Each structure stands twice: as C-alpha cells, then as structure tokens.
Amino acid sequence: MTATAPTARTEARPLGLAVVGAGYWGPNLVRNFQAAEEFRLRWVCDLDLARAQRVLGEYSTVSATDDYAAVLADPGVAAIAVATPAATHLEVALAALRAGKHVLVEKPLAATGEEGRLLVAEAERRNLVLMCDHTYCYTPAVGRIRELVGSGEIGDIQYVDSVRINLGLVQKDVDVLWDLAPHDLSILDVVLPEEDRPIAVAAQAADPLGVGHACVAYLTLRLASGAIAHVHVNWLSPTKVRTTMVGGSKRTVVWDDLNPQQRIALFDRGVDLSSPDQLDAGERRELMVNYRSGDMVAPALGEKEALRAMVEEFAAAIRQGRAPLTDGRSGLRVLEILEAAAQSLERQGALVPLPSVQRVGVAW
Amino acid sequence: MTATAPTARTEARPLGLAVVGAGYWGPNLVRNFQAAEEFRLRWVCDLDLARAQRVLGEYSTVSATDDYAAVLADPGVAAIAVATPAATHLEVALAALRAGKHVLVEKPLAATGEEGRLLVAEAERRNLVLMCDHTYCYTPAVGRIRELVGSGEIGDIQYVDSVRINLGLVQKDVDVLWDLAPHDLSILDVVLPEEDRPIAVAAQAADPLGVGHACVAYLTLRLASGAIAHVHVNWLSPTKVRTTMVGGSKRTVVWDDLNPQQRIALFDRGVDLSSPDQLDAGERRELMVNYRSGDMVAPALGEKEALRAMVEEFAAAIRQGRAPLTDGRSGLRVLEILEAAAQSLERQGALVPLPSVQRVGVAW
Amino acid sequence: MTATAPTARTEARPLGLAVVGAGYWGPNLVRNFQAAEEFRLRWVCDLDLARAQRVLGEYSTVSATDDYAAVLADPGVAAIAVATPAATHLEVALAALRAGKHVLVEKPLAATGEEGRLLVAEAERRNLVLMCDHTYCYTPAVGRIRELVGSGEIGDIQYVDSVRINLGLVQKDVDVLWDLAPHDLSILDVVLPEEDRPIAVAAQAADPLGVGHACVAYLTLRLASGAIAHVHVNWLSPTKVRTTMVGGSKRTVVWDDLNPQQRIALFDRGVDLSSPDQLDAGERRELMVNYRSGDMVAPALGEKEALRAMVEEFAAAIRQGRAPLTDGRSGLRVLEILEAAAQSLERQGALVPLPSVQRVGVAW
Amino acid sequence: MTATAPTARTEARPLGLAVVGAGYWGPNLVRNFQAAEEFRLRWVCDLDLARAQRVLGEYSTVSATDDYAAVLADPGVAAIAVATPAATHLEVALAALRAGKHVLVEKPLAATGEEGRLLVAEAERRNLVLMCDHTYCYTPAVGRIRELVGSGEIGDIQYVDSVRINLGLVQKDVDVLWDLAPHDLSILDVVLPEEDRPIAVAAQAADPLGVGHACVAYLTLRLASGAIAHVHVNWLSPTKVRTTMVGGSKRTVVWDDLNPQQRIALFDRGVDLSSPDQLDAGERRELMVNYRSGDMVAPALGEKEALRAMVEEFAAAIRQGRAPLTDGRSGLRVLEILEAAAQSLERQGALVPLPSVQRVGVAW
C-alpha cells in the first residue's frame, strides 16, 4: 500500500464510506455499514436523490446526494460500496478506484469478463482493495463447509449439487443464470480446493415464458479432479429450495439454508470401493463395494448475519492491506464461468472449457 | 385376440400365472399376485430352486421349480411375470411369448432398444399383452398428475424437474442412469401429452468411485414443445430425495414421494407474461410480467399399493384384449432415451436426437 | 375523546411518541416506530442513558434520555410505548396515562391482575388508548385464523392445541407460563368467539433445574362451549416448535410459524357424528361416525411484519378514538388466566374457575 | 420351568403356535409368526371362520378354525397369541394359561387392572410366559432410547413429552386414552429407570363430538424423581404426529417416528444450573444459568420391523424361561395408569396417586 491511497491506512479511526446505489440491495448495505464500528457511513448516493433519502429515512444524520463526483472528492471517504445495476459497475467502480478509494461491488463483479479484468487490473495497479459482495460466502454455513473441506474431513470431493429455486423476479436484462448462479458459483469458489477447480462448463436452459432468455437453467461444471458440480437455478418454481450438497469420499455435507434448526448436516454414510486402482478392468466388474452407514451430525452454528461478516472482512482487508476472501479475482472467476455457460447454451449444451485464471492473492 | 392365445380369454376363472426370477423384486410380485383375485399363482421359477422355495416360505401351496420349460408347457399358465436380470429379459420373455403367454417384464424392458423392439414386435404379432412393470406409474400420485396435466389444469408444461437420489446399491452391470432413470422416464412417458414428447437428450455424469460407469448423472430432455425436463439420479447421496415438479402455465404440481401426508401439492403460484407474442424484440425487454400468488392445495390421495394397481392393470389388459398403460412400446421409448443418453455421455454432453417412436396402442 | 388529550386528535401530523425501556424489546419498537409514517419518534428513555443511546446508534436524530419526567412533560409526545420490566409496568404506564398520554405496554400488561385492573380503569376514565403489545395477534397467520373462525368456515371449535417450546432464556423473576404463555393466550383471546371463552384453568408444571419456578408447563383451558384448549410451553427443549391447531367441526386449521412456505394449513379432514343429539345412551354406543378425507389448502399469506401492523393499529385506535384489537381488557383477561394457572399449580393441577371479565370495548 | 409346560422347552424344534382373533391386528401377527423360524404357526382361530380363512388367504397350509377348545387341546401348540377385543382378553388368555400354553396378548393386557392382575398371577403360578404385545417397545428407536437413558448419556431425566395424534378410528368401547396412550405408557415403562417411575397421574380430556367418551386427551405423570411426563393423544387431528422427547440434564433425545431418515435426534443443547444445591433461596434468584449449544447427532438405526423383534423376544423368553421385556407386569403397570387417569378425568383433572407395582421379573 503506497501513498496513492493514504486514507485507507488510518487504523485508529473508522473508515469513511459511501454507498452508491439505493435500489434493492443498497438499504441492506446502509443498515450494515451503520451497525459496523469499523466504518463511518458518510453518504448515500443515487441518481435519484429522493430514493437515496428514502433509504436513509427521516431520522438519519447521513447525507443523501445525487452527486457522485462530490462523493469521490470527499477526502473523508476511504471506501465506496457499489450497489448500482451490473451494467454500470465498470464505470462506477473504475471511477472510485481512480479516486484512490477501496471498492466493494455487489455481485456480479461486472457485466462481462472483459470489464471484470479491467477492474481487477486497476485495483492491483493501485494497491487498492477490490472486493465482490458474495454475501453467501460469509454465512456461518459456508464457513463451516470451507473448514470441513479444507481440513480433509470430507475427503476427496466426489460431486457437488446445488439447487436455488424460487418464484423469483424475472429480470429484464439478465437470465436466471446471471441472476442466481453467482451465488452458487461464488460459494464453490471459496469452498473447493485448488485441485477441484472447474475446468469446463455445460449448460442447458429453457425460456418457457418467452421472455427472451432463460428462466430455468442447469449448469454442469467438470472439475480438474474429474468430479462434477451441478447447479439448478429456476425463477418459476413455486416452492423455495436452497440446498447445496458436497459429496466426499469420507463424509457428505448437506446445507439446507431454509432449515434454520439444522442448516448443516454432516453424514458419515456413503459408498467405498476396495482399492479400485489395483483392479484390472475385468476384476472391476466384480466390485468390492462397501457401504458406510454411520451417524449424521448437525453441528451447532452461530446465526451471525452474513452481511455483517462481509463488512468486517472488507474492513479487515483494507486495514491489513490484503486481499479479501471474495476479492476481484474471485468475482472474475465467477464471471468467466457465466460467460462460458452462455456459450454452452448457444451451442446446445456443448462442453466449453474455462480460461485459466490464477487463483493468487493480490500482490501488494 | 385370436385362437393363438386361448388361455387368456377365460373370463370367469383367475388367470394362471408364474413368476420367473426370485431375486430382489420377485418376492414383491409373488405377494401381490397372491393377493389379487384376478390371478392364480401356480409357479415360482428360478434357476436357484432353493431361492424360489425361500420366497414362497414354509406355508405355501404354490410350486417352486427351476424348470422354466415345464412352466411354459403348463396349459394352466396364461401369463408370465419376468423378474430376472435385464440381460436375460429378451430370452425369457421371448420364450414366454412364443409359448403363447402374456408377459409382464420388470423394468427396463430389455437390455437394449434392439432387444426391446424384438419383444414388442413378437407380442404384437401374436396379439399378446406385453407390459413393463413401471411400478411408479401406478401410484395414486402419478395418477393424479396425469389427470391434472390431461385436464388442462396445469396449463402448458413449462418444465419438469425430477430428483431421485439416495444411498443406493452400486450396480455392477449398469450405471445409475439405467438403474434409476427408468422410473422418472416412465413417469414422464405416461404424464406428458403428445406435444411434449421428448425429442432430444443430453446427459452429464461422473464416476467418482472409479467403478467404471456413472454413479451420479443428470439428464436433460428437450421436449417437442420447447419445454425442458431434467432428471437427477445419484447412488451416492446420503439423503433420500424423490421429488418431481411439473411446472405449468396455470399451476405447478410438486410430488414429494417421501412426504406421505402431502405427496402432491398443487400451487397456484407463478409468473405470467402479458401476451409476449404480440411484442417485438425491442418491446420484449420491457416485460409485462405478472405474478400469481395463490393458494396451495394438497389433494387427498388414496394410499393404494402401486404394485397392486399394476397387477390389476395387467389382468384388465389381458381380459379386455388391449394395451396396458405401460405397454411394451412405453418400455421401448424409455429404452431409447437411455440409449441416447449413453451416446450423449460419450460425446461430453452433446444433445442427441431421439428416434421417433409412434405412441400408438397395440393393434389387436 | 375530550380536551384532556388534545395531542392525540391532530390527524394531519404524525403522533409524537416516546419509547421507554431500551432493553430486549425496545430496539424492535424503536425500529418500527421510526418506519411508521403515523408516528414521529421523539425520545428513547431508559434509566441507563448509555443503553438508550446504544439503541439509537450513531446516526440518529432522536433524543436519548434518562429523564422520564421530561418525556411526560413534552407536549409533543402523544403516546408512550412501555418496554420496561413487567414489575414496573404499573408505575410507568400509570404515570403516562395521568400525563394524558396514550399507552402501549409490552406483554404482559402488568405484574398482577390487580395492577392490570388499575391500568384499565385509569385509561377508561381518561378516554385514553391502553394497548397491550400482543405482537403475534398482528401476524397475517393469526389474522387469517380469526377470519376462518369468525366466518364459520371452521365450524364449532372442538379443541385448540398450542405448543411453544424452545431452548429459551430461563427467567429469574417469572416462570415459563408467565414468560411464554401470554403469546398463546393472547392469540386465543382474539381468535376464539364469545361462546368459546375460557371459564376454568388447570396447570401442570415441573422445575427440573431447581430454579425455583416452572421451566416446563402445560395449561388446560375449559371453554364455555365444552371444548378444550391446551398450551405447552417449555424453556428446555432443544428443538423449536411453534404450532397452534384449531380443530373445528367443519375444518381444522394448523398454524406452523416455523414453516414460512406454509404457515397456515386448512384441512378438510375430520370426523363427523350423525346427529348424536337424537341418540339415547344405548344407541350412542353404536356410533354413526363418518370420516371426511378432503384436501388441504395452504392459503397464500402476506409476510407483513407483525410489529408494523401492531404499530398501525395503535395509531388507528388513537386517531379513531376506539379500543385497539388487543386493548387493556384483552391484556387483563390474559393476566387473569395466568393468575388462575398459578393457583392451579399450587393445588396440584386442580381446575380453577376464571373471574368473569366483560369483553366489551372501551366506552369512550 | 417345570413339567407343567413341557412343550416350551424343546429347543430344537419350532414352537407350535396359534393366533386367536383375525381382526385388525391378527393378520400382522400371522405374517410375522410365519416369517419367524422360531415358531411354527398351526392355527388361526376366530369365532368367524370365514374371517380366519380370509386372513390366511388361498395359498396357505395353515388351518383355520372357530373351535378354540380344539386349539387348546392340540399338544403341538406351545403358545397362543391373543388378538381378540380387550374385553375378552381375560377369558381367552386365562383359558390358554390353564391349558399350559405361553401367552402373548395384544395391548392392553386386559380390560381392567383387576383382570390384568388375575392373568399375571395365573401365569406366575404356572411358570408360563405372559407377554404383552407392546410393539413400539421393540422398534430400533425405542431400543436406542433405552440405551441412551440406561447408559447415563442422557443424564437425569427432566421431562418427557409424547404426542400421538392422528385422524383415528373413533372407538365405540374405549376412549382415546385407552386406545392410544398404552403405546406411550408402555414405551415409558421400558425406557424410564426405576427412580423415574410414575407415582401419580392427572388427566384432562374433551369429547367434542359427543360420542360419550374422550376423543382428545392430555395425561400428566408425576415421576418419583420430581420430573414430569406428558402425553397428548387425539383422534381428531388431521395431521399425524408421533413424537416423543426425553429431556435430560446432559442430552435430550427426540424421536420422530414419521421421519424415517432421522427418527432419533440426540441434542447436546440445554440449560445447566451452576450447583443449585449450594445456593440458598435468596441466591437462587440470581441464577447461575449456563447454556450448552452443542451439536445434534442422528444415529444410524436399523430398520428392523418391530413386530419381528417382538416375536423373537417371545420365543427367547419361552426358550430361556425368563420374563420378556414387556411381560404381564409391564402390561399391568400400563393398565393401572389408565385406570388412575380415568379417575382423574372424573375428578376434573385432580392428581391421582398410582398403586405401587413391584417392577420385578417373574420368579420362575
């Protein structure tokens, strides 16, 4: 971190912050940044001034504005939280980075991989924190799955199956993959170890309403290890399902986000093969299969609000001059999968290889 | 029905029947055929005589045998129920048809589409009933879904999503698609109307145990109407899920077979588009989307055992000289989807068109 | 409404309000009164000034104070929301009423029936609104149950069963009945029609931790109609259950507050007796019982926050000079049941009759 | 075991058995005794011969009869299983005992405690096995709960709560307590340790249909230790619930019999009090309460049919000359609770002490 970003290193005082975009997600950011001691919310900025005022309500001392330039010019502002439509992320975030501000961007990082790469490069060049608000990655449930996978308790990953369906707002500008799959893909990005990185994508989808893009979609990721990850997203389902299953050679973890009393279930049940590597093809037909029929454990999880933890990680990354868990590169990997999935859809579900993205931290 | 099958038309007396194959499924057939007034169980036949005896138990007056030729030669036997391994279906069922017996075959109809076609042709040539034991098609739940779709209450079908996962017996000879997907595919076969017939298949799968074939698989069917049907089958899941969702333009029905108190839920919730056909591409971006937020109804269903209803349909088809609901052609359509799925797997998930199969009744 | 409460009738302007008590429940009141256009929050008052300030946070224009007299002296304050410990409700609310303020009191209305009667009398004498914050009564679910019972759709009430168990905060000053049962009793108070008023109470309880009062308790209410209502409250249960079942002669409604996708289920299933009144005792043994096995309907409910609706009812009652749904008398009826239950506990579960309380509106 | 019961000791051969009563429960006994190697089913006896024949079906070698005397005279019959109406248990079972047969009786043991005592005395006098078919006691779930309580893993029992509600067959002769509560009471009888024996009973009930006896009932048991057990039985509930919770000082176990994937859940969550014994009454108000917020474990359970295990226990008790788990005395303890509950109902829910029953094994 150099002199180009002096405001970001003042450890003692709260970090001055502005929220840009007072639409759907903005109010959640406003509420959480106000509750965080690490930050001092100074501005809520929206092209529609009345909307910015409405988000703040009648009892607030925070300033509403429609003048983004004034916000960027405020030396008391060390960081910008961007909650504008995805199509504007490049412009808004780039301006912030160029003004020397750390930036948090609502998912997806940008409208295209190309734009995402511009943002990552700009932030790295300036030694500024660029973070993507992949909120689910900060839930206690995902934190626990990360631990279970990272510690080896799950064993080798065999398959991942994620379902995120609900009667959802049919978006005009993006299909259901761009709207919902970033949640699942960002979770996979922080949960899967290096050897299970996605290497290719196939997608199938339908537009039964005739809105011009997919409302129901299925995504298959081939992982480097040979395992498979599958994502089902759907705007039309009358029932809400949010379940992610990570099957491993030792344990399987099932996350049901709609079951607050038992979000995470860790199963010691599964199928083992007796040393398949030592068998020739003929012998392999005589499978030596063993079944484990062990207990299920539902670990006690805290109920800390994910947005609160995300805000704390943003502050910590700025203070410590390090990449946050869901940094720009993580956001970029998600974008690249979405773009490959769009290509697969155009090619009737053909498997599309992913560009390689180095999973390295920001080099300060 | 002609003189070639005289035993099948004696209406007054129960139909003499033999069960061939006393393995996993045979005992269920034995129990249900014994309980059915329409049939008189005469033989249980297995290459392993002791196994046949064991299925009958110590209190039975039914004969156990390992002599299939003697069973076929018994003029009191009008029908044969085949519960041997799939690889033997062609041989066992063909011999029965050639002996003038009506035949019920455990799913899948045969080991290949080619074999299935031979059986269908033989049965049609001889005016004999050839039925596939697609048991789920005879559940009260599937019956109700058929009614809901057929009566137009669901509206146009928009998507179908079926999940059948469980810690299952890893088969040596067949992959998880051939083992489990016939259930879902046979259900779709009786539920979907003509205009929603599958026309192409794409499949993705993984073999994380290294057993030599897929243990986790995803199947996408493109329907003639443009809608999509998706099937998830998995032998490795520690939790059991059996859910089929049929999304329609008017209603959506969700079948959860593991919730006996509420197997079928009919939702009056969904998304409508205001006359999309009248919009040009430009206007379509300004979507006129309406959300219905109506009630859910869980209709009262009987709890009649599906196998019992299947047995009754077999008897009725024989008595009335008509094709049963799940006739040989239905079994053949399922086989053809499985074969196309296998091709898709070899081609990394590419979309494979289905051969056209006429969905016509058997012409007596 | 007379000149003694002039501030309450100015329809055009928001009603000035103070929240007294910044403990467990206070922050919820602060948040909801701030969000309500009908009110203008002017003060948050607590003996612990720092706690009042903490509730308001760092961005608020509302005043924190520990000077209740100053709050009462503020002519801009038309109403007081009391969220102090129950033991202080009499003192705090009485002072407010005597200062001509409308009063909202957190449940229970007061520490004893005697104190509750004093508050009701004072409010009625002064034509001021006295409302008890029985929050659950303002949920969409309870609103729907009220409609279903009131419209006759349920038929005659046969039984009510309510379960409210959870790992809860073991209170020092009150037992589990006084802590949790007011929720169930206040719901019954607004749901049950006049002819189903409770007339007697029996209670059973245990104190397995040895804390000096009940941690697990069961309450049985005999209703005037002969029906029964039962309440199970428990601080020690590791699982959370919040279910209320209202069984009727025509329908039964089950409210599961922990199932957001299906909070209310209306069952057309039950048992009917063929004209039992026309049978003599001998015939009655030959019961003419019929079973209805109809559908279940889960009606679409809004997800409006109950506290918000409660705040609106408080405003509407003040504006319209009428008793709110959960007025002081309603709070008093709940208190009287709790006191009778305490007597029953002392008498090993004997049935204790309830004092009669007129269920009439406040006479302005 | 003496020469009076010689048939019962022949270890090598199966025990000859007759089932008496071919009504609701009889077919289940016939099926399970036929499947058990330990027994040889010789007769099914019913006053209605056709009914006995119907239970056996058309393929059985077992004899149907309406001549009970002939059954008792058959020296090949070592044991009688009684599945006749409760009012006839005394007569049928007494005759069997006097004929030197071991006896299994469907629950409840007899129509009254007095009758039950006669049966127990007769069996003990003759050194014959008298067993009550408390089927639930032989489920893997109850077996596991017994282990958890017996091993001390649960700690001291704090409360038991059991719910058994369903749209049930309204009985003509018995109320819902006599019909359903024997299940819960027999489970408690085998699960609770000596120091938690019930010592008194209070009951509340309602007859909203006017059938002449209770259709909804609540039973409270005071245990010797000071803990409480509560049972809710209901014939009118449109939803089915079968849940038993055993709360302990160390763990709490919840048995949900309708959740096959997770019947038993063991919670390491609860409330501890810091040495309450060392506190005086004044200090006790300042509770030193600690909350444990540990994991939940759902142990793997087998799915063995309970009736099968019950049949095996009957055989083992006969072979080994010992009392079975649910012997006549256990059945008698259940009867005595039911009789005390009936008295409590007559006395408006007053607490009724239980007669003391020695929980000792049969002295052979």
Image: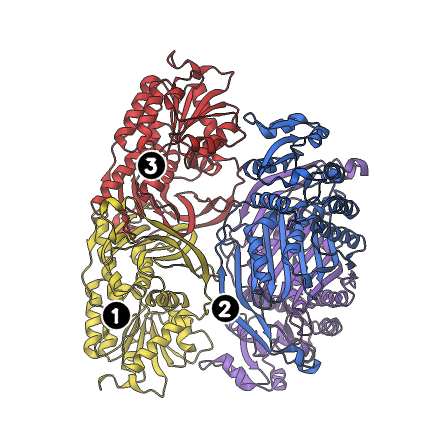
Chain colours: A blue, B purple, C red, D yellow
User: At label 2, which amino acid type do we have?
Assistant: Gly
Percent from the top left, x then y, of residue A82? 68, 38
Relative to A226, does residue B287 appear above or below in the rendering? above
Q: Quick one: label 1, few (<14), some, or many (20+) residues within 10 Å?
A: many
Percent from the top left, x then y, of residue A65? 67, 27
Label at residue C196: 3
Tell me the element at label 3.
helix
Q: At x 81% / y 55%, what residue is drawn? A: A347
The one nearer the camera, D91 or A174, is: A174
The one nearer the camera, A77 or B336, is: A77
Q: Is residue D259 left or right of residue A115?
A: left
Are tags 2 and 1 found on a single chain? no
Tell me the element at label 2.
strand
Q: Quadrant of residue D353?
A: bottom left
Q: Is residue B254 left or right of residue C76?
A: right
The numbered mark 3 sits on a residue in which chain?
A: C
Q: Quadrant of residue B341?
A: bottom right
Relative to C304, does residue C273 appear above or below in the rendering? below
Residue farthest front in this picture: A3
Relative to A211, does residue D258 appear above or below in the rendering? below
Are tags 1 and 3 found on a single chain? no
Q: At x 39% / y 73%, what residue is drawn? A: D309
Q: Mark 2, mark 1: which one is toward the viewer?
A: 2
Label 1 belongs to which residue? D328
Separation of residues labelled 2 and 1 (CA atoms): 36 Å
User: At label 3, which amino acid type do we have?
Assistant: Asp
Label 2 belongs to which residue? A294
